[in-house]
Amino acid sequence: MSVLASPAPAQFETIGISARELSEVIGAVYDCALDPLLWPAACRRISDLCESTGGGICVHDLRQMQNDQLFVFGYQPEFLEKLGAQYADSPMAVSDVVANIGDVNALSMAQFHLREGRFFREVLEPFGLQDMMWFPALRTGGRMASLHASRSDSSPRYQEHDVGLFNLLAPHVCRALAISDALDIRALRSEMLEKTLDGLAAGVFLTTRDGRVVYMNRAAEKQIKAGTSVRLANHRLAPTDSAARAALSKAIDQSARDHDAAVDGRASEHSVAVPDGIGGGCIATLLPIESGQRQGILAPFAASMAVFMQDPIQAPPMPGEAFARLHKLTGGELRVLLSLSQGLGGMEAADMLGISEATVRTHLQHMYSKTGTSRQSDLLRLLSNSAPPLGLH
């Protein structure tokens, strides 16, 4: 692998930054090759360097015709959904078909006729975006990744010196992505999470803020196929009961509002009864997942909400309930235990449950006393030995 020559001093004058600033950002990019979890911070540094309001890495799956935003910031969820729906017909996608890896483009360049196009009118302008600059950074299998930055309509369009900066950074970003291939790491995380969710007896639907389903586990797919309680309509959850349909839609909207208003993103759960019309049905529990550890775990799915759909007759409303009754655990103690049983650490469990890490430790001490154990591993082993295996649907 050849090493790029250092930019000449005149290049720094052209792009308006110092050699030290550029060197630090390039160093941060190569750090990502060793630890892909550093990409969000690197994307922000690149965007800040070219005075952008948003940015990140766009992953386009040519086989599934899907467009996912990885490590993005500065965008409304509705914009990302709109961009994903229209990306295949966007000037960016059309340009990248013939572009070489590392070729930098901006929508404000003359050949894109920015303000004359439907993409600007329907996707950018409604969300206050003025311009986007990007380059294809990696092609692997049927997927392509590009790094992009954007400016709001309160900022000027990208100029020649901005494109020059991206041109200097592009080879380094391309190399770093090629070394680590963050896309494979992302796919691996998704596959591991899917296996975990497929082991649950409850149906799990991951949705966007407006209820569009972006993922279903195996149990959820069976519930949709059965169609007795819930179906999909326009990619959204649609209970067969009209009252439940309205209630679920309202609950999804309210959950998003509660999340926005909650301190530290700790919004309450919402539950909705979803009858099947023949004397049975499910309970739908909604949980916002846009912040904290929930967001980190479920980031590969670009979801905002988790909807757990469970038949209260076929499975207890709270897994481990019998164990809790046996050892006289409180509801708070059981919630901590179940979080830890999913592989979360104490800090992660605290973040997911909206409590302090000290409270987690206190609950653990109480459970050690009640169950006759002295270590977390022994407590979790006792839970595992006491509970029947999850139904694999």
Image (cartoon, rainbow, N blue to C red):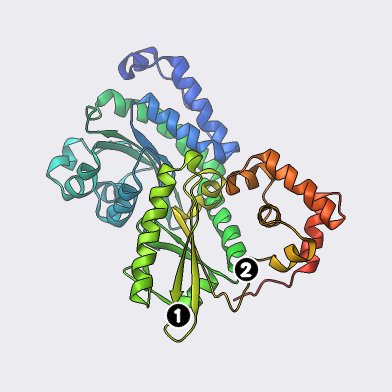
Query: What residue lies at 81% left-to-right and 60% top-to-bottom?
Result: 381
Tag of residue 225: 1
Amino acid at pointer 2: Gly
User: Quadrant of the image for the C terminus?
Assistant: bottom right
Residue 377 or residue 89, whichever sits in front: 377
Above or below, 320 against 91 in this view is below
Mark 2 residue crowding within 10 angstroms, few (<14) / some (14–19) / many (20+): some
Q: Secondary structure at mark 1?
A: helix
Question: Can you give x and y, in whole percent of width and height, for residue 282 in the image?
Answer: 50, 74
Q: Is residue 219 visible?
A: yes
Q: In screen coordinates, is 232 left or right of 200? A: left
Q: Secondary structure at mark 2?
A: loop
Question: Can you give x and y, in whole percent of width and height, for residue 14 in the image?
Answer: 31, 17
Q: Which badge, 2 or 1, comes first in the chain's sequence? A: 2
User: Dot 2 corresponds to which residue?
Assistant: 199
Amino acid at pointer 1: Lys
Query: What residue lies at 57% left-to-right and 32% top-to-bottom?
Result: 31
Query: What residue lies at 16% left-to-right and 36% top-to-bottom?
Result: 110
CA–CA distance in space, label 2 to label 1: 18 Å
Question: Can you give x and y, in whole percent of width and height, for residue 53 in the image?
Answer: 33, 32
The image quarter containing residue 214 is: bottom left
